[in-house]
Amino acid sequence: MSTDVIVLAAGKGTRMYSDQPKVLHPLGGKPMLSHVLDAAAAIDAETIHLVTGFQSAQVREYFDKHPVATPLNWVEQREQLGTGHAVMQAVPSVSDDKTVLVLYGDVPLISPASLQQLRDKAEATGIAVLTLVTDNPAGLGRIIRDDQDRIVAIVEEKDATPEQKRITEINTGIMAFNAGRLKTWLASITTANAQGEYYLTDTVAIACGDGGTVSGLQTFDDDEVQGVNNRLQLADLERSYQRRQARQLALQGVTVSDPARLDIRGPITVGRDVMLDVNVILQGSNRLGDRVTIGPNVILIDCDIGDDCVILANSHLEGARLSSACTIGPFARLRPGTELGAHAKIGNFVETKKSTIGAGSKVNHLSYIGDASVAENVNIGAGTITCNYDGVNKYKTTIEADVFVGSNTALVAPVSIGRNATIGAGSVITSNVPESDLAVARGRQKNIRGWKRPVKK
Ligand code: UD1
Ligand code: CA
């Protein structure tokens, strides 16, 4: 049987105190709602019906820019009249033979495994509820079971008797249905309750009244059903998510100095014997080869790091591709378009941008290399700057193999330095240097013999 998913995301998210829709707030580097859509995709949902209301244009705009593989059906819920009402807006576009799962856009860590099991149960009985036993059921719908332990109703906190409020098994909100039967049940729910809302949860008692069986699936993982209503809950869930990723990496063979001090905000691929020190942030999509060592406080954004590279403390790399055995930092900044050959070295306080630096070349201290092509075995002295920008346009610097650039050199682009050339320290190079020449472009030193310093009057 094929499956559709309805995601409820029309709520206002008042307690986020944000101009951004709640479901677009990121967790692990991507919107909460994207996690939910990924879970739906993982169980092969045919169509995802996205019920939005408050700030729906912003949500739509995001997914127009970041398309997902599963077809999305956008459903507008103009007034938020309850979870039942939200589902009513979506069901007309779900065919009766389907199994339909109802997820929440603000419950991001729901696991495909639980959804799979819940779907199986709904396929057997027509209706299934994901429940959790918790010490803190306040505010949530309670699961009412009869003396034979069968689920017969869900009662919202505001409608519950003091005795029902003592029940610790709660409705996570995540449910699965046979679509045809869901439509019939929805037709008979009313707003006769404490909140005057259409409760999706009323389908449970209605199904039982019809003589049906309601399946329950209990989860033991409270993170997967944790909803986010404020930024404290979001921060707590972020920590759980990060700890989970760190644990997974450690079990997969990565040395993680402290699983509580690692943040992975996107997909990563890692080789063998990778070492991640404390406070490392891996953002976007990153690949780390075998035996890569990442020092403390390093940020990698969309990088490809070859085998045996060492990134020392406090370095910031974005959109960089490193071949094997490069050494970076400490305190280096590699900007997008940086490509390093094997054994290249970028030292402290060096910034690179849109530049290739060949195998074995070194830029060890205090330099800016931008829009440059540097070949193999080049040594760039401390304080060298490629002057790539005249205030209007950008120009290229080309440095051929085996060049030695003396310290504190300004290379005024466009300029090229021929193979094996040498540049004297402190030079301002404004024209090309032929192969194997020495270029010195600075004032000559003048010594004045026996110079008398002025004396105080
Ligand atoms: C609901 C359940 C409750 C469960 C709890 C778990 C009902 C009646 N109650 O509570 O049993 O324990 O979730 O968190 O279903 N939404 C809409 N449109 C609406 C109303 C809600 O899209 O008209 C969305 C919200 O954005 C949110 C989700 O549905 O993502 C749940 O709404 P919320 O108000 O948080 O849940 P409750 O109704 O309090
Ligand atoms: Ca909620």
Image (spheres, rainbow, N blue to C red):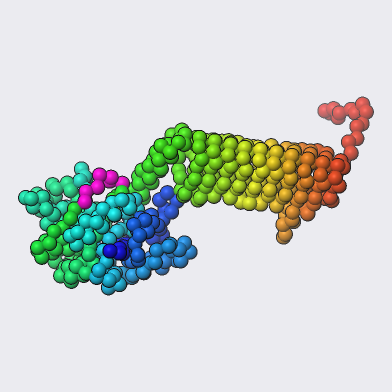
Residue 363, given in percent of the width and then of the height, sits at 70, 39
Task: Tell whether 30 sits left or right of 102.
Answer: right
Q: Residue at x 85, y 27 (%)?
A: 455
Question: Is residue 283 or residue 286 the one in the foreground?
Answer: 286
Measured along the vertical axis of the image, is residue 274 above or below residue 219? above
**Is 249 within the magenta?**
no
Q: Quadrant of the N terminus?
A: bottom left
Query: Total number of numbered labels?
Result: 0
| The quarter of the displayed image where residue 197 is located | bottom left
Q: Residue at x 10, y 50 (%)?
A: 149
Q: Residue at x 41, y 43 (%)?
A: 245
Task: Tell whether 243 sits left or right of 143.
Answer: right
Q: Which residues are magenta?
A: 217-223
Furthest-bottom residue in this view? 92
Furthest-left residue in this view? 147
Residue 160, given in percent of the width and then of the height, sits at 13, 55
Measured along the vertical axis of the image, is residue 318 above or below residue 379? below
**Is 220 within the magenta?**
yes
Q: Residue at x 72, y 55 (%)?
A: 389
Residue 75, given in percent of the width and then of the height, sits at 33, 70
Question: Is residue 451 or residue 58 the one in the foreground?
Answer: 58
| The quarter of the displayed image where residue 247 is located | top left
Task: Tell whether 105 sits left or right of 287.
Answer: left
- For residue 54, say whether it is visible: no
- For residue 34, say whether it is visible: yes
Residue 25, given in percent of the width and then of the height, sits at 40, 55
